[in-house]
Image (cartoon, rainbow, N blue to C red):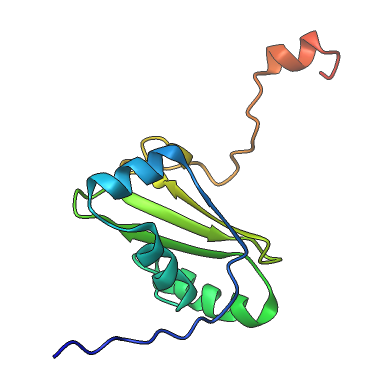
Amino acid sequence: MFQPTRLKPLFHPGKLLVSHAALATLRTNGVPVISVVLRHIAGDWGVVSEDDKRQNDVSISTGLRLISIYRLPDQTRIMVITEWDRSNTTLERLNDIVPGSDVRPPQPANHRYPAWPKADYAQEGRA
């Protein structure tokens, strides 16, 4: 017989914001938005690293940002972010946030953003 599973929320997600691309991808995969949100607020952080899982566990009590990543049946990844003040939770496709996130070239440790060429600094009088 069917036994419902009761999930205890660990935090209030605030306003729910879902990008058009994430919604379309979830629908294509037959995954309801609410199932992703329920996993997130119950502390199932998905496929994030062990360090990120530990950070999320600490962030619940200290009031920092919470991040989960869930892999869908078609291997697309959905990122769920709850802001530090719990004002909103956003669902986006990971590839829309970090283009080419499946294959990322290594970045030098001293890389800074924005990476302005020196010529741009000279033109703006900042050289």
User: Residue at coordinates 68% horizontally, 79% vertically from top-left?
Assistant: 62
Nearer to the camera, 97 or 25: 25
x%, y% of residue 30? 23, 53
Instruction: Tell me where residue 38 sits by quadrant.
Output: bottom left
User: Residue at coordinates 59% horizontally, 39% vertically from top-left?
Assistant: 111
Q: Residue furthest left?
A: 1
User: Residue at coordinates 48% horizontally, 69% vertically from top-left?
Assistant: 52
x%, y% of residue 40? 45, 69
Which quadrant holds the C terminus?
top right
Decide: is 74 above or below 89. Answer: above
The number of callouts visible is 0
From where the camera sits, is residue 98 visible? no
Q: Residue furthest top?
A: 123
x%, y% of residue 29? 22, 50
Decide: is 118 above or below 31. Answer: above
Left or right: residue 92 compared with residue 30: right
Left or right: residue 115 compared with residue 80: right
From where the camera sits, is residue 120 visible? yes
User: Residue at coordinates 60% horizontally, 78% vertically from top-left?
Assistant: 60
Q: Residue furthest right?
A: 125
Instruction: Tell me where residue 4 sits by quadrant.
Output: bottom left
Which quadrant holds the N terminus?
bottom left
Left or right: residue 14 compared with residue 97: right
Left or right: residue 13 compared with residue 74: right
Nearer to the camera, 14 or 58: 14
